[in-house]
Image: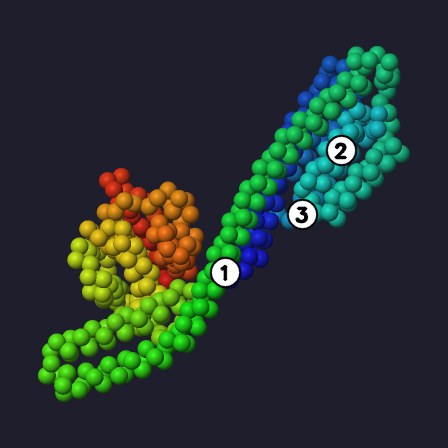
């Protein structure tokens, strides 16, 4: 069964990278918001603020954010610690700004809640609690060291109070940014859950392969000896004088030998498709000879008179003739023959560094449900128990060879299955 540890780690990395991108966007909003707020406070309300200190902080945040954008675009691996450091920089910048603008008497001190909530959403438990401690410490330092601004208190002026207006703006900022940011985080979570569900489904399918491998292994042990015995006996019959004199009987014995060899190839193909070898190694051959042999054996055993084979490839390319690939191709051709006895077409060509095998038929095409569940086991229109493994085995062989499979219905009728397999997986 495929190990899910690495895919899950990749999901965590991707999720952390998306969250870091959200923080970078949020920080740009903070930079613009601080510039606008300082300009309004100084220009409109004549609040005495140290522009050099607060402007330097805004410039620092802008530079830090630009560096973060470049840094995390080139290196997508983002840990919870990296997210904590990013939030820590935001808290430090906010603390510095509040120190020069009234400390706890500044209504924008409640923006610390935004940092705490973001920490609870983005970080692991220990880091989120660290963020709580950092913000409490920052507020304590502001209460101890920061001096109020030299403006009169006007809380009794109701909505006309500068402090009350600041509170309203701070609340609107907190609420709006949290709604926007958490919605984006939830979208990321849904995407991660969808990918996780796909990985779990793949693990279930791989478990089917393991079970099939065990079943096929048992079948190989049980069938291997009698098949070998029968093959020896039939070989002895072929050398008997009575068979040499009776042409009809000799043809029947030769047919028996061919069918025995076919049974052995079928067992080998199932074992290899399930991930086990039967002990019969791959043979050195050429691409043209291998494919021609597969086509001839399949056509003669299935009596497919309407089958057509064409190719545009380097037939002299040296490859390892693998029964796994042969069984995969035979499964596709069997499906095409069953769906369309009136005609099947196999075309093989090379595209760049890949071997492309295309199987067409003239049947009714795949139902929509089969196309949507492509590559899953037991998806079949035959209505028989245990059927529907052909495309499942094909998809897993292609995936083992690091190739790709495409399946769709043709506008003029019939179905098309296109396999793209790297030549490096076949060549010696």
Measured along the vertical axis of the image, is residue 116 above or below residue 377?
Answer: above
Q: Residue at x 15, y 78 (%)?
A: 249
Q: CA separation, marks 3 and 2? A: 19 Å
Residue at disc 2, secondary structure:
helix
Other-residue count near label 3 (Cα within 10 Å), few / some / many at <14 / 14–19 / ≥20? many
Q: Which residue is mark 3?
A: 80
Residue at disc 1, secondary structure:
helix
Foreground mark, 1 or 2, reads: 1
Q: Percent x, y for residue 262?
A: 28, 70
Q: Residue at x 61, y 37 (%)?
A: 186
Q: Is residue 370 left or right of residue 168?
A: left
Q: CA separation, marks 1 and 2? A: 47 Å
Numbered circle sitting on residue 207: 1
Q: Percent x, y for residue 332?
A: 30, 56
Residue at disc 3, secondary structure:
helix
Does any portion of residue 320 appear in the rendered image? no
Q: Depth check: give the residue in front, 220 or 75.
A: 220
Other-residue count near label 2 (Cα within 10 Å), few / some / many at <14 / 14–19 / ≥20? few
Measured along the vertical axis of the image, is residue 278 above or below residue 352?
Answer: below
Q: Is residue 82 left or right of residue 242?
A: right
The quarter of the displayed image where residue 147 is located = top right
Farthest residue, direction front: 384
Does any portion of residue 82 appear in the rendered image? yes
């Amino acid at each position: 069964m495929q190990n899910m540890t690495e895919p899950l780690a990749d999901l965590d990395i991707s999720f952390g990278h998306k969250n870091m991108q959200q923080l970078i966007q949020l920080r740009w909003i903070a930079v613009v918001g601080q510039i606008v707020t300082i300009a309004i406070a100084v220009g409109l309300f004549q609040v005495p603020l140290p522009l050099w200190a607060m402007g330097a902080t805004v410039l620092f945040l802008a530079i830090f954010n630009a560096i973060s954008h470049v840094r995390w675009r080139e290196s997508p691996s983002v840990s919870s610690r990296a997210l904590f450091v990013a939030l820590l920089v935001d808290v430090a910048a906010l603390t510095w700004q509040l120190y020069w603008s009234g400390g706890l008497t500044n209504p924008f001190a409640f923006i610390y809640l935004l940092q705490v909530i973001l920490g609870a959403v983005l970080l692991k438990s220990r880091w989120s609690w660290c963020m709580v401690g950092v913000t409490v410490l920052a507020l304590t330092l502001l209460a101890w060291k920061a001096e109020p601004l030299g403006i009169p208190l006007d809380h009794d002026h109701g909505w006309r109070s500068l402090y009350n207006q600041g509170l309203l703006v701070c609340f609107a900022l907190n609420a709006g940014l949290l709604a926007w940011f958490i919605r984006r985080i939830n979208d990321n979570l849904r995407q991660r859950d969808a990918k996780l569900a796909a990985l779990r489904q793949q693990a279930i399918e791989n478990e089917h392969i393991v079970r099939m491998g065990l079943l096929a292994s048992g079948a190989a042990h049980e069938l291997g000896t009698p098949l070998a015995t029968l093959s020896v006996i039939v070989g002895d019959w072929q050398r008997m004088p009575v068979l040499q004199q009776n042409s009809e009987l000799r043809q029947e014995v030769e047919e028996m030998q061919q069918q025995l060899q076919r049974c052995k190839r079928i067992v080998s193909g199932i074992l290899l498709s399930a991930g086990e070898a039967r002990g019969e190694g791959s043979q050195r051959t050429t691409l043209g000879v291998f494919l021609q042999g597969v086509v001839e054996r399949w056509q003669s055993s299935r009596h497919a008179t309407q089958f057509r084979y064409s190719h545009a490839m380097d037939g002299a390319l040296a490859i390892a003739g693998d029964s796994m690939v042969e069984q995969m191709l035979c499964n596709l051709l069997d499906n095409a023959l069953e769906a369309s006895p009136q005609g099947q077409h196999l075309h093989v060509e090379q595209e760049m560094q890949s071997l492309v095998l295309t199987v067409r038929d003239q049947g009714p095409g795949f139902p929509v449900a089969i196309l949507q569940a492509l590559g899953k086991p037991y998806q079949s229109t035959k209505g028989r128990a245990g059927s529907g493994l052909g495309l499942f085995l094909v998809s897993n062989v292609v995936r083992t060879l690091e190739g790709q499979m495409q399946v769709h219905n043709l506008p003029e009728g019939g179905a098309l299955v296109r396999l793209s397999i790297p030549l490096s997986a076949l060549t010696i």
